[in-house]
Amino acid sequence: MLSIQTDSKVSIFEGLQIEALWKASRQLGFPSALWRLPHKSEIQLLISIQDGVKKCQPDLEKLSPGFVMSNFHWAVDEEVLFLEGDIIITFSEDNQIKSVDNKLGEEHPDVARIVHLANAEKELPQADSHVSPLLVPEMPDMDARLRFQRTVELAVSAIRQNQFKKVVLSRTKDLSYSENFQPAKAFCKLAKVYPHAFVSLVNLPECNEMWLGASPEALVRQDSAGVFRTMSLAGTQNARNAAGELIPKFDIRWGEKEIEEQALVSRYIVECFKKIRLREYTETGPKTVLAGNLYHLRTDFEIDTIALNFPELASIMLKLLHPTSAVCGVPKTPSLKFLSEIEGYDRSFYSGFLGPAQVSGDTNLFVNLRTVRFKEGTATFFAGAGITEDSIPEREWEETEMKCDTLLKVIAQEF
């Protein structure tokens, strides 16, 4: 059994759990991030104490350990949000502390305040277990449905006029949540339900908002051994039949629309490799993968940056890839212009990117999909659908509903 580090700077955290530490750091107004990488059991909590949320250029190989977050409209010459890793705590699957990296030391007054509040939180009675955190509307928003289907029709028309080959339209779904909602508890449940996803919870006190998500799509990953990875992920269908049973992967059949949609994303990545004259990469797929209550098509790409003497590859590919054709369209410029004119709302951090950078030498940035923003009593769910010439408006609406349900079904049952 792994135990916490013997360093005296770790000892004051002993016995504290994720929910208590998250709540304490949030009450004190410190930016913080919780995450669990795909197919991993460890959960990590980062608390940024000294400088709050900073802005910096995403030169990933030069960053100190921290957490990166960027909005959809980030451009290569702009800065991203950065949460410095003043405290990074690693928890085991059973919510026990395995290790603590505390740059400030236990004598720092803000560290002591966090620990004091977290210890006090342990003694408080739990919230009423019968109070639902989300109030789901009884009737669907028919106006929203008609508006979205109309934008799909406009997108299909634009594609047939050769303005672009594909565009990814998105929409929001607003619900209210009560004071009893516990975001860290919802995060822990998502982490258990979706082991294949990058599950994250980020508190941005300066924006007075939190972002919770379970993303299936890696944007750029580069580990301490120098291995770079990215993926193309597109095509969507329900993973369960009418009886709610999981459909076996070998029974899944993909239509021409989904296959072409996924191929466009893969070709986009290969074109990015060509721009930097990179030819030595491994491509695997496409294959059918499960993501929550959905199946997708995925192709994986891998590169040994040490063998190529290319340590800055992740930073360069980040600038080339974002926004990917899986969240924007093909070609990028006309599809982005179409979205700006037609979509009708600010995506904010949805379909941007986020994740830990240089934590234990590893950088893992994911596209911010399957996400919900909590702000001033409103939970805003975001979802998108790839539109091609063969898209049917009604089916695209249903796809966005399925994607919203990926999070909603877990969070709505939290209590």
Image (spheres, helix red, strand yellow):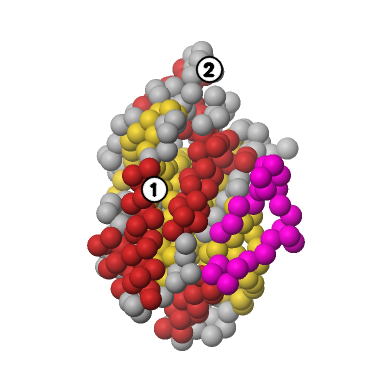
Q: Quadrant of residue 22?
A: top left
- Please, which residue is most extreme toward the left here? 341
Residue at 66% x, 45% y: name it: 242
Q: What element carries label 1?
A: helix
With respect to residue 265, does 12 lie above or below? above
* The stretch drawn in magenta includes residue 241: yes
- The picture places residue 257, in percent across and down from the top left corner, at 54, 69
Name the residue carrying label 1: 145
Report the magenta residues as a range: 236-258
Residue 63 occupies quadrant? bottom left
Q: Is residue 157 magenta?
A: no
Q: Where is residue 378 in the image (x, y as percent from the top left)?
A: 35, 34
Residue 285, image x and y in percent?
Answer: 64, 72
Q: Is mark 2 on a helix, strand or loop?
A: loop
Q: Can residue 27 be seen in this view?
A: yes
What residue is rendered at 27% in x and 68% in y? 337
Q: Which kind of residue does numbered mark 2 sit on?
A: His
Q: Quadrant of residue 136?
A: top left
Asked whether 205 or 362 is in front, the reply is: 205
Q: Name the residue under label 2.
A: 130
Q: Which of 140 and 101 is in front in this view?
A: 140
In the image, what residue type sits under mark 1?
Arg
Give the quadrant of the C terminus: top right
Check disc 2: other Cα within 10 Å, few if <14, some if 14-19, many if 20+. Answer: few
Indicate the position of residue 115 as horizontal and vertical percent values.
45, 26
Please identify the quadrant where the N terminus is shown: top right
Q: Decide which of tag 2 and tag 1 comes sooner along the chain.
A: 2
Q: Which label lies toward us, 2 or 1?
A: 1
